[in-house]
Amino acid sequence: MSGRQLNLRHTHLVLNKGQKRERQTETVADKSAHSGPLQGSISMSTAFGQQIDQMGAVALENGVHFRVWAPHAEAVSVIGDFNNWDESCHPCENQEGYWNCFIDEAQVGSEYRFSILNGETRYQRIDPYAREVTNSVGNAIVTDSEFDWEGDSFSLPAHNELVIYEMHIGTFNRRSEDHPGQFEDVIRKLGYLKNLGINAIEVMPIAEFAGDWSWGYNPAHIFAIEQAYGGPKAFKEFVKAAHQHGIAVILDVVYNHFGPSDLDLWQFDGWQENGKGGIYFYNDHRSSTPWGETRPDYGRGEVRQFIFDNAMMWIEDYHVDGLRYDMTAYIRKVNGIDLSDIPEGWTLMQWINGSIAARYPGKLLVAEDLQGEEWLTKPADVGGAGFSAQWDANFVHPVRHVVEQIEDQYRNLDEIIGALLYRYNDDAFERVVYSESHDEVANGKARVPQEIDPECPDSREAQKRSVIAAGLALTSPGIPMLMQGQELLVDKWFEDTDPIDWQRSKEYSGIVRVYHDLITLRRNLRGNTKGLMGQNCRILWADHDCKLLAYHRWMDGGPNDDVVVVVNLANNPVQNYEIQFPGEGEWKLVLNSDWTGYSEAFDDFPVETILASTREESEYPSAAIAVGAYSIQVYSRVSQID
């Protein structure tokens, strides 16, 4: 059964659940055929002869058109600073559960709410589609969508060329102790990121959340941009500036739950079942998530459209280059782990991802699922969820486990080998590989250097082994990702109130340099490590006693393509150690993490470019290498002997 057929089936199964009367609604399958987001299922009334079918507040030349879905309301009006918040001034017209009103006194910048009557109770609600709010418990603001993109036509690099930098706006470059960092503060650091070699930023959620300090995974208003970060225009300026620096912007979105605090969507029009959340949420056991009873009702057509419109907004109106969905396991399963499937959650992801792929090819769609489900990254038209890639727990957990071991004897090379070779659907670039992310450096866990040496996170061992962890991510098949500050040897754990200390860029300038050099090799910017962008990886050598591992990376093979990575996971250097190489000829050492130029704590064990040849007693080419303690080396093939 195709993805479109599944969408249609599950919409019919649950569309009218809990409603007082039946409604005529376009099917999800019908909607997915449109060339742009419908933003609602029924064509609305006109204003000065102009048909309005957009939800929320739409600013026109002569006023503002308002539209809201409240199927159980008995009356709805628009209140705002243009009518002294008088609910009797501007009543809305009801068209099968959608309420509409044109107000010529309203304009861009006007503050407003919807006043909703259900029985004897009147609710004042923030517009679910509001693009801007004064704050999470304040008022919606009529927003002007006009913006000068200055011809922005940025294209996301190929997925095998990406190096992603995960960023939290509030802490990345915070300049005030009393206020979170803002988009304009990040713009000031884009040159630094470009020089580091980053070509994609993954921004933790920026939808309006409760208060000013948050990770962002508690969205109160998913269409509004967090006011503490600067609001919608400032975000557009940030995206435009990033593109001008050659940096893509990938945005975290949270569709597995909303809120749970400051949530005007809760019992929005007064209706609910079982004391649950009402029209936007499941009203049975499916409402339950680890973050509250606020899982959206993925089977209700209007809620599906609400989430679909949100995803499309980021791509179309804000020019973002991809989306990363937070914890998709809780979109597709009730408890995220067992057979408690939510089929309509799966079909919703298919619809959104399939539509983005069709309309905007090349966008990066990433799932944080962490369950190793390869169907997530199969195309929607064959039954998959349609993601480009997924965060790979099969990389981060074994890599951290090995490098954080206290004693060398317990480091298991097989764990690293498994992490290197794991892939989904036989495609290395369907996974995002990393040693640090916001989840892996909080919630009871700390930064890798801190985990290695809690007493002294900048010790020799902490520096060396944390660089190995990053080096493995940057030389493995997959899309590598760094967590903000990782290259600065940031310690402790991630907190939304703890900003990056940029003095560390001077104190640990050598560590910044090794990250820069690794990224340069990963992106083949010097033209001699093309293999690091390739699909292929083969284990050449694994000495479980010495804890020495070597692997071959290549795209097409040959000079300037073939790469050999050697990793010493023991605190003992090796010298004159013979290992297999992929072919005869000269292999140039292009990176040695043990260099004291990276850190005065490093050993600078003497190493050099080598010449691989086939010995009489062996059928495979080999060469004698020297590797410093706790270090990673990268060799590039310069020439070959046929």
Image (cartoon, grey):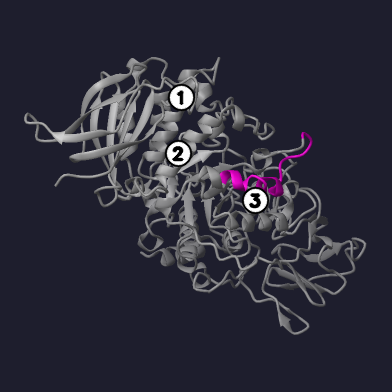
Tags 2 and 1 touching, CB below 8 Å: no
Q: Position of residue 399 (x, y in %)?
A: 40, 30
Question: Marks 2 and 3, how far apart in space?
Answer: 58 Å
* Secondary structure category for the residue under label 3: loop
Q: Position of residue 195 (x, y in %)?
A: 54, 45
Q: In the figure, is residue 141 to the left or right of 440?
A: right
* Circle on res. 273: 3
Q: Can the viewer see residue 276? A: no
Q: Amino acid at mark 3?
A: Glu
Is residue 513 depicted above or below 560 in this figure?
above
* Circle on res. 517: 2
The local crowd at label 2, few if under 14, some if 14 to 19, many if 20 or more residues have their Cα within 10 Å, is: some
Q: Nearer the viewer, residue 65 or 197?
A: 197
Residue that mark 1 sits on: 596
Q: Earlier in the sequence, mark 2 or mark 3?
A: 3
Nearer the observer, disc 2 or disc 3?
2
Residue span colored magenta: 177-193
Nearer the observer, disc 3 or disc 1?
1
Q: Amino acid at mark 2?
A: Asp
Quarter that holds the N terminus: bottom left
Report which quarter residue 270 is drawn in.
Answer: bottom right
